[in-house]
Image (cartoon, rainbow, N blue to C red):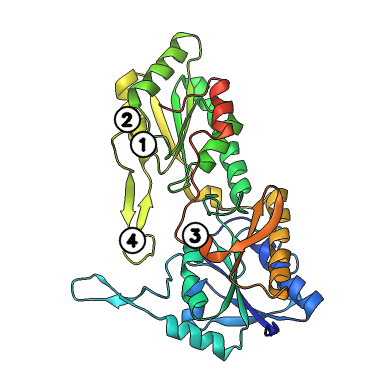
Amino acid sequence: MTKPIRRLGVLTGGGDCPGLNAVIRAVTKSAIYNHEIEVYGIEDGFLGLIENRIRRLHSADVSNIITRGGTILGSSNKADPKRFATGYNESGDPVFEDVSDKCLKHIEEHKLDALCLIGGDGTMSGAQTFVEAGINCIGLPKTIDNDLHGTDITFGFLTAVETATEAIDRVHTTAQSHHRVMIVEVMGRNAGWIALYAGAASGSDVIILPEIPYNLESICDFVRFRSKHGKRFSIVCIAEGAKAEGGRQVVSRIDPTSPDPVRLGGVGEQLADDIERCSSIETRAIVLGHVIRGGTPIAADRVLGTQFGYHAIEVLLAGKKERLVVMRNQEVTDINIRDAANKQRLVPRDHQLIRACKAVGTCFGE
């Protein structure tokens, strides 16, 4: 017989993104109003479980937050319970410990019957510690990168695309005025979803994705051709994880205390230098960075977050375990949470939007 859910813990892990508060609101209010389940907010992702920072959430705590960006619970992308940095040795290197037992102790202390884990691939991978310990974990797919395996879309992605598109739109005027190549670098890690969609929406002339290594000569030939035929400026949208053919991704820094230590960034500046040298056309680079993580979620992400949060509670009440709420073929459903762990959803080279962009003359640097 399935144990009834009386107390539910909810946390937001990984990087912040628009729409998190919409999900927290939907999970909390659905649980309280419809099923009299007590909801407990875990602060700063898995770090709150490690440090026992867990507080009761009432309906008033989540009222009027659907329009707000970020997360009222806070987040962390460094706290992996299986490999948590507890200090530094004499050489200055971080010392890691498995603190999973602390987390399980705090879950037991607060009598939590299940966890709602809102996050991306890192959070779902971290959830395996608790799944293996018998804790029922329900995942909700969050990441602006849209790279979580098993779902067609993650909330936060569409707002990030909207923000990036608006920024690229503004770059058009200065590029045209100065007859420059303007490169806009966007986030996405190893996946090019933001670059593809923002590049398509903004009418970028060149879109560079991690999934399609670029050829510098091809890009230079393309911008030179445009310049000679009356189009004296070009807009390039490039994903931070892009790399040249035979080259490597550009790393801005390494954070050894993080479960995902590699911080990508700088490929836009590198490409700008290469294009200017190769084509003799003045080139500038802009890095949008964390700008596209912030701000108010657009309507689509508020709606998606509400749908996901509601479905998570329905999954729990149906007696299901270890599920990830996903969107597939425009329908909200759920899959085994293990199916999304330690995997990334990348852009297929034959994606329909790539074909559509090529049909209207967009260069992908091939």
Residue 56 in picture, x, y percent from top left: 66, 82
Relative to residue 48, is residue 359 depicted above or below?
above
Residue that label 4 marks: 255
> 300 left or right of 84?
right
Kind of residue indicated by mark 3: Asp
Q: Earlier in the sequence, mark 4 or mark 2?
A: 4
Residue 166 in view: yes
Say which element carries label 2: helix
Q: Residues within 10 Å of mark 2 (few under 14, many from 20)?
A: some
Kind of residue indicated by mark 2: Asp
Foreground of the two, 82 or 267: 82
Say which element carries label 4: loop
Q: Residues within 10 Å of mark 1 (few under 14, many from 20)?
A: some
Residue 196 in picture, x, y percent from top left: 53, 36
Kind of residue indicated by mark 4: Asp
Question: Residue at horizontal 68%, vertical 67%?
Answer: 312
Residue that label 3 marks: 121
Distance from the alpha carbon under mark 3 to that under mark 1: 28 Å
Q: Are marks 2 and 1 in contact (CB under 8 Å)?
A: yes
> Any mark on residue 17, and which?
none
Q: Nearer the viewer, mark 4 or mark 2?
A: 4
